[in-house]
Amino acid sequence: MSDPKIKQYTHPAGGWGALKYVALHLLKEKIPGKGARTLLAQNQPDGFDCPGCAWPDRDHASTFEFCENGVKAVAAEATAKRVTRTLFEQNTVSALMQQSDYELEEHGRLTEPMAYHAATDKYQPISWQDAFTLMADHLNALDDPNQASFYTSGRTSNEAAFLYQLFVREYGTNNFPDCSNMCHEPTSVGLPETVGVGKGTVTLDDFDLADTLLIFGQNPATNHPRMMGELRECAKRGATIVSINPLRERGLEKFASPQHPSDMLSHGTTISSMFIRPTLCGDLALVKGVIKRVLELDDQAQQNNTERVVDVQFIAEHTAYFEEFATDIRAESWDDIVTESGVARDDIERLTQVYVRGKNVIATWGMGLTQHKHGVATIQMVSNLMLLRGNIGRPGAGLCPVRGHSNVQGDRTVGIDEKPTAAFLERIERVFGFKPPKEHGLDVVGTIEAMLDGRVKVLIGLGGNFAMATPDTPRTWDALRSCALTVHITTKLNRSHLIHGKDALILPTLGRTEIDLQAGGPQGVTVEDSMSMVHVSYGINKPVSADCLSEVDIVARLAHATLNNSRTPWLAYVEDYARIRDAIEQVYDAFKDYNLRIAKPGGFHLGVASRNRVWKTASGRAQFKVLAIPKDTPIHQARRKYGPRLMTLMTTRSHDQYNTTIYGMDDRYRGVYGQRRVVFANRLDIEMLGFADGDWVDLIGVWDDGIERRADRFLLVEYDIPRGCISSYYPETNPLVPLNSYADKARTPTSKSIPVLLQRSAEIGV
Ligand SMILES: Nc1nc2c(c(=O)[nH]1)N[C@H]1C(S)=C(S)[C@@H](COP(=O)(O)OP(=O)(O)OC[C@H]3O[C@@H](n4cnc5c(=O)[nH]c(N)nc54)[C@H](O)[C@@H]3O)O[C@H]1N2
Ligand SMILES: Nc1nc2c(c(=O)[nH]1)N[C@H]1C(S)=C(S)[C@@H](COP(=O)(O)OP(=O)(O)OC[C@H]3O[C@@H](n4cnc5c(=O)[nH]c(N)nc54)[C@H](O)[C@@H]3O)O[C@H]1N2
Ligand SMILES: [Mo]
């Protein structure tokens, strides 16, 4: 590797490297002293829920679980750095635009509400009351409530999210774009059709019993480091862990738990014993291949009168459409399976053997399965595989989608949903006495399209960074700039504040680590983790400023200012969040005794029907689904046109970022230091294209709408990645994702399969 900033990481993931980075981050955020106290309260019964990922905790009560990236998330929020009005006095918005995303967030926590003034091109302080009046005036001036759209990012608590959807529905629209649209939507759309619920079926206890784990398209050492503790235990117990990923992620090879001295003094624990390396978006074909082999082995077993390989009894008692499904599988061609998956027959055989030997199998997945045109079908194919051997709805086995944001699952559960069911809307009407709109609303892609053609004029964001997280960056920026009003309720400065409408507000809010003091005393909020456990979270740090309001407070006061004749007791809700939980309980039966049940350490499980083999599908059974291997996607079409020069780009997270928040410039498990504009490619592809490792290249989007899409100047790095596939980081590469390139049925942008060409960058500076 020619660049000194690229060097292979030979240590286990976690380990001393993680401890060193933790110390550096606490120092960078200037919180060495109080940092320790803050960190010890993380995920404790009387502490706060980690604002990092959605991986659950053992009992949410016992030991302090060390997690480098959890520390970074907490440190980023608990930072001693502050954005004050001086920053905005000294800098126009155009001047701030010159700063990088890293620099913007580095200014620290937002401390007072600010409003944009076009005359000076600056943000200036505004009182909360004036801010609410400005928003209410805009909202009430629209011809139709559907001209406003209300974004949610997944850190928002159940309480704030529930009030937000209630306000927006009483105002009159179902326009609820949320980060989930860009994330696990294919899971939420795919699983209800096959197993009846769009959530995972396992809890942490099942990991204790599993003997086989299939990890699809996930990089847990970076994105869900607490999951590594579970994987370590499973590996130590002798469970077989297979990583199914085009990349051989370091964290899935070796992991050293900082909690276990033996790991720290040795070379760590081996995690995955098998790496299956499909081509990008090849998983559907791969899983179909495994299923085909399982059926072949089952046929042989029948002929030989040995034990059946499929779970005959489960299939008979619990499933529907097995015959059609099996017929389709038998007819599938091996050539197509191998070509489209990029996995050799031998490897398919190895994976099949592991799967059929497993008595209790858990399949987990992340963005590697969801962010593709066939994300929904791929997840349904995984569900097919698991149903074959009855691996759903019994201890030690099941489906485990691993969510991203710490409350993204809860937000959807309590009503952040642009496609609400009729039953839910009736319940809202019954409990709150207003008629919510029935027409389905806009998602993320729909909102950007509607802004572009003038149908949406107001965007309000409860958390997140809409301008950077979304696809097709230049068009999305045009869309945001065409708005009459953009508002962001956030903790840190980000680019969405700078890509603004005619009027714009920055509304600073408390983070989960801070004490939320209201008339009724300090308030806790609740969140639901990836395994449907709901628990309460109390902040322990002093609020970042006296002029910061909680999300609940902001939403309630916005509602109070906007809705003239509302009978909803908005302001009373703020006094005591237990009242909001009572209201949630009235709408959702699953939240029965909500306040009582969160008083228990660890909280409660929401109940997932498929976990108990109750199938809430059209047939009342778990459903096998016939799914064809896609052979004419935009990638295929582009490859037919450009031949082997056409590359499929995936955009992933580095180890030093939280989505659009850049913590630092290293991705050490992948050997990258001090930079983010890198693109990994296979050595043979680099040669074939006439480049060399260390060259600078531009990425040119290939799409059929005549719009030029490009992202310039990336360092080309030789990497162990399948041919025809390249990898780079998000959000720098979002300009390459076409707005109308999304998952069928789920409309999740195809951030892991973007057709591009590489071009040598122009020489600069000479
Ligand atoms: N520290 C930290 N933690 C986070 C986040 C963060 O940014 N930083 N983000 C949070 C959020 S919102 C989310 S959604 C999660 C994301 O967590 P992940 O899903 O782990 O996120 P990605 O970095 O997008 O990585 C996806 C993985 O999928 C693989 N992959 C890509 N394409 C394919 C494919 O076609 N097939 C297969 N089999 N694999 C593929 C990539 O090589 C990579 O290992 O993490 C959450 N936690
Ligand atoms: N190309 C590409 N694009 C992607 C992805 C990808 O893999 N590739 N991943 C997608 C995925 S999985 C997701 S989830 C989205 C993420 O999209 P978002 O959720 O919109 O983005 P974040 O970067 O998580 O948002 C960061 C901002 O949230 C604010 N914030 C932080 N904590 C809080 C809080 O407690 N309350 C409030 N109100 N605000 C807070 C801060 O101001 C911070 O700047 O991006 C998606 N975009
Ligand atoms: Mo996500």
Image (cartoon, helix red, strand yellow):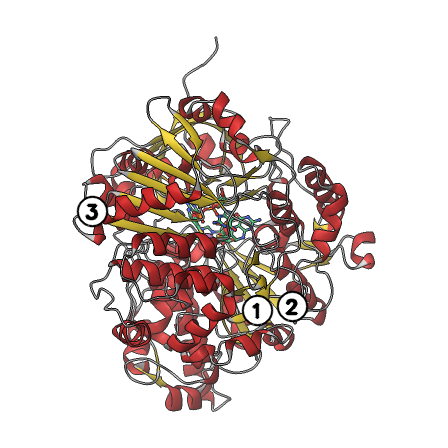
Residue 648 location (% of width, % of height)? 38, 43
Identify the residue under disc 3: 142
Q: Quadrant of residue 211?
A: bottom right
- The Cα atoms of the two marked residues, 2 and 3, are separated by 45 Å
Residue 458 location (% of width, % of height)? 28, 44
In this picture, residue 57 sits left or right of residue 167: right
Residue 100 location (% of width, % of height)? 49, 29
Identify the residue under disc 2: 60
Answer whether labels 2 and 1 touch (C-beta < 8 Å). yes
Other residues around mark 3 within 10 Å, as few (<14) / some (14–19) / many (≥20)? some
Q: Which of the two residues, 229 or 434, is positioned nearer the viewer here?
A: 434
Which secondary structure, mark 1?
strand
Which secondary structure, mark 3?
loop
How many numbered circles does the render carry? Answer: 3
**Which numbered disc flags the more N-terminal residue, 2 or 3?**
2
In this picture, residue 315 sits left or right of residue 274: left
Q: In which quarter of the image is the N terminus?
A: top right
Residue under the point 80% across and 53% down: 264
Identify the residue under disc 1: 535
